[in-house]
Each structure stands twice: as structure tokens, then as C-alpha cells.
Image (cartoon, helix red, strand yellow):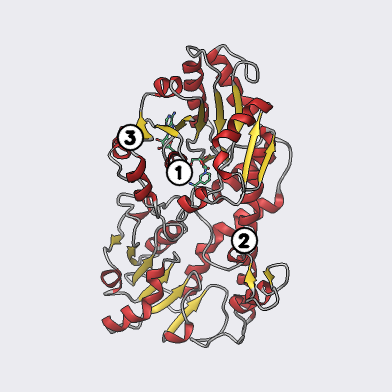
Amino acid sequence: MRISIVGTGYVGLVSGVCLADCGHDVTCVDLDQAKVGMINAAQPTIHERGLAELLARNAGRRLRATTDLAQAIGESEVTFIAVGTPAAEGRIDLSYVLEAARGIGVALRDKREYHAVVVKSTVVPGTTDGPVRERLETASGLRAGRDFGLGMNPEFLTEGRAVEDFSSPDRIVLGGIDARTREVLGRVYAGFADVTTIRTNNTTAEFIKYASNAVLATMISFSNEIARLCASVGDVDVVDVMRGVHESAYFTTRAAGQPPVKAGITSFLEAGCGFGGSCLPKDVTALVGHGREHGLGMPLLASVLEVNRGQPDEVVRLITRHYPDLGRVRVTVLGLAFKPDTDDVRESPAFPLVRRLVAEGAAVTAYDPVARPEGHEALVGVRLAKSLPEALAQAEIVVLVTRWDEFRDLRTVLDSLGLEPLVVDGRRILDAGEFRTYEGIGRSFAGSRAGAAT
Ligand code: NAD
């Protein structure tokens, strides 16, 4: 099929490259000329495992990028909208989606063949059949459902393993205003015949995405609230508590003769320094805002956000147990990406933490193996190191924020430098017993004593 995708960010580019690799002919459209040039030169614009190989295989063949929206619409049968939907002032900012819809509508005015427009961006329930439809119809002079198709196909990929997730999805949700739109979408995903596919209307498709992200965020804040109490009670470690929770048959399956298999959800039932990224914070914020517009308080999800906002303070609390005054104390923050295996720093919990440390007068050095957010407003006055040894060289305090594999070797690198800083483990991936002074989220043992469970 001939497919166009508007917006060539994490979702648009990965979808485009993977659909091209499935055999479709894909045109990626973006306003950003630099991104377009890089994609046409087969250079990845983001850090994602496997993306470079797929780009090299498809760019210039089944995949191209352009800034010319009208031409891309004219030459394709279906267009996906994959532009950003940030949260602004407690609600979703639909301006990019609506501007893309308007541009597509203008291009549809001159098109004779049937065309389907599909929203892939995460949008609050009612958006596709509401303002998106309205923009498309006004700009094109056509009617959705009669003259063109209108669908909603949420994306569930996770940054860091986006190519893998798109290529082997756990589910596919195909929303459509009518059967004809869903039939077009069915052809786009014809290569995924063995994947569970939910065919539904546009509003349900939109809701599935929000409900999916909201439950994950809730699990994380639940774990962090439990961790706070563990940290206060004494003689308990949230890691041991959650290990006991994970062993429940709800979370771990046991087949005779096979090792127990933990459900993926258990990775959200672990304490840490909070969720970030371009999805969970903004999607939960948007859902709470959407609830408010419908007269619903959404108290559970509002609390999920509140607990999350407080997590960086939990880290600072652990530090100030040892350093009540942080003036000129050398602190190294490990990890700026919101999660490992990505260069995405949007809403990373590292930033509110760094801001607090700088405000307390600490001399902060930050290091991330991949993310290089030079010029980020939260990093004013912060030294960015280029390697782990360089980042640690002078450290009196080390705070681990992102679960990068490289940081699991912290003990070895500290040994090579002959250093024994205070280590604050914001992700609970280090062995407490390896450090002279260790603090971890959700842990109330004195000193470096290991947990009780075996
Ligand atoms: P992004 O910010 O990385 O990319 C958006 C792109 O759209 C940018 O390159 C921008 O230049 C381009 N753009 C904006 N307006 C445009 C227009 N009118 N015409 C052409 N290009 C335009 O965004 P993203 O992270 O890929 O997210 C896109 C959507 O997918 C969001 O709604 C997000 O919530 C959702 N989503 C994201 C993820 C993720 O992990 N990043 C996962 C699932 C769903």
C-alpha cells in the first residue's frame, strides 16, 4: 500500500520504517527540514535499537521523507497523523494534531480517489470524531464516512525497544468511523495476521490507549507510595516486599517443570524515583484534565500524578540524611534519559532532581550514556560528563536515576578511582552491601545492611 505519515518523531519514524520493511511504500512528512534530510540520507534522528539497520535497508527505496504534505497525500491511499500531543496547563494540547488535520483536509480537496485519514497520536477520547473530523471536513469540503475514511490506531511502542514493539506488537487496535476505514487499516496491518486485533470505533480506540497508560502509571505510583512507608517504618526494604507481591499467581505463572515466569506488569510494581517520558506524565495529566471537562474529579489519577511529582524529593531526603547542607558538595547524577536505551529526556525525573540539588547549592555533574541534552534549561550550571569515570572522578555523592546497564558496574568504576562516595540508588539496581554508604528508595535499614529475604 502507499502510506503517508505526518510527523516523523519517535512514533512516526519507527512506524514508517517498520511499515516500509513490511513491504509498504511509505512517505514520511515533517515540518523539520533537518529531520527530513537525515531520513533521506538513511541517518537515524533518534536513538532506537535496530532503527539504523531498517533505515539503511529501506530509505531511498520503499521509504522517503518530505516536507511537502500535499504531494504525500496525493500519492498515498492512507495518511497517519503521528505528531506530538503535549500536555499544557493541565490538559492536552491538540494544536499540532489539528493543524496536521487542517493541512491534510486542504490536500484532500484536490484528490479524487478515496483516502483514509488515521490518527495515531495519543488523543483524548472524542478527538478523532470531534475536532479532527471537523478540521478535515471544513478544510476539504468533504464528509467523513462518505467521501473519506477516518480512523484511530493508537500506538503502544515503548521507547528503547520501539522497533521490536512495532514489529512484534502485543495487540493492534483499529478504530474506524465505518467498516471501509477499518478495511483500509486491515490492509495496512495485513502482515500481522496472528496478532490479537481489536476492531472498534474511534472513541474506544482512543480510550484503550489512555486506560493502558493510566494503569501503568498507577502501578508505579502505588509502588512508590508503598516505598515511602517502607522507608519510614524501619527494618524493611520495598524490594523484598515487592518480591513477595510478584510471586503471587496473579503476577507469576508456574507451569510444571518450567521455571516461574513473571508477568511484564511486575516491572511497573517496583519502586523508583518516578515515571517520566513523553507519554505517562502527559497522558495521565490529559486524562485528568479531560475528566475535569466532563465534570469528573478523577481523584485516583490525580493522586498518581501527585505521588510521582514528589519522588525526586524522596531522593533529596535520602541525601540530606548524610549531607544536611549541600552547599558546594559534589554530586554526580547518573542518567538523564527518562528510561534506559533511549535518548529521550522529556519529563525525565532527573531534571526536577537536578534543579533541587542546584537550588541547594550542590556542584552537580550529570552523565548519560546516550542522551546529550546540552542547553536544557534544567542543566544551567551543571557539568555534563562524557564518560562514567569522568562523571565520578570527584564525586562525594552519586545518585543513580536511570536504569542503564552501564551503571550496574558502578562498584568497579569507583574501585578504579579509589572512591567511596555516598551512593543513592534511585532505581534499586545496585547491591547495597557493595558500598560503604548506601541509600535506596524504599529502604529503611541502617547503613549498607542487605535485605532480609533470601
Ligand atoms: P515527537 O515529538 O517525537 O514527534 C512529533 C513530530 O511531528 C516532530 O518531528 C514534529 O516536527 C512533527 N510535526 C509537528 N507538527 C507537524 C505538522 N503539522 N506536519 C508535519 N510534522 C509535524 O512525538 P512522538 O514521541 O513521536 O509522539 C507522537 C504521538 O505519539 C504523541 O501523541 C504521543 O503521545 C504518541 N505516542 C508516543 C510514544 C512514544 O514512546 N514516544 C508511544 C506511543 C504513542
Element at label 2: helix
Instruction: Report the side of 206 relative to 402 (left or right).
Output: right
**Residue kind at label 1, given as amino acid type:** Cys
Q: Residues within 10 Å of mark 1 (few under 14, many from 20)?
A: many
Look at mark 3 in the image and give the residue it sits on: 36
Say which quarter of the image contains residue 369.
bottom left
Query: Label for residue 18?
Result: 1
Residue drawn at (48%, 27%), measured in percent from left and top?
100
Name the spot of residue 37 as percent of width and height, x first. Answer: 29, 35
Say whether residue 347 is visible.
Answer: no
* Between discs 2 and 3, the one toward the N terminus: 3
Q: Is mark 1 within 8 Å of ligand 1?
A: no
Viewer-proximal residue among 138 and 234: 138
Element at label 3: helix
Look at mark 2 in the image and give the residue it sits on: 221
Residue drawn at (41%, 74%), measured in percent from left and top?
408
Viewer-proximal residue among 25 and 100: 25
Element at label 1: helix
Residue drawn at (60%, 66%), measured in percent from left and top?
224
Name the spot of residue 230 as percent of width and height, x first. Answer: 63, 76
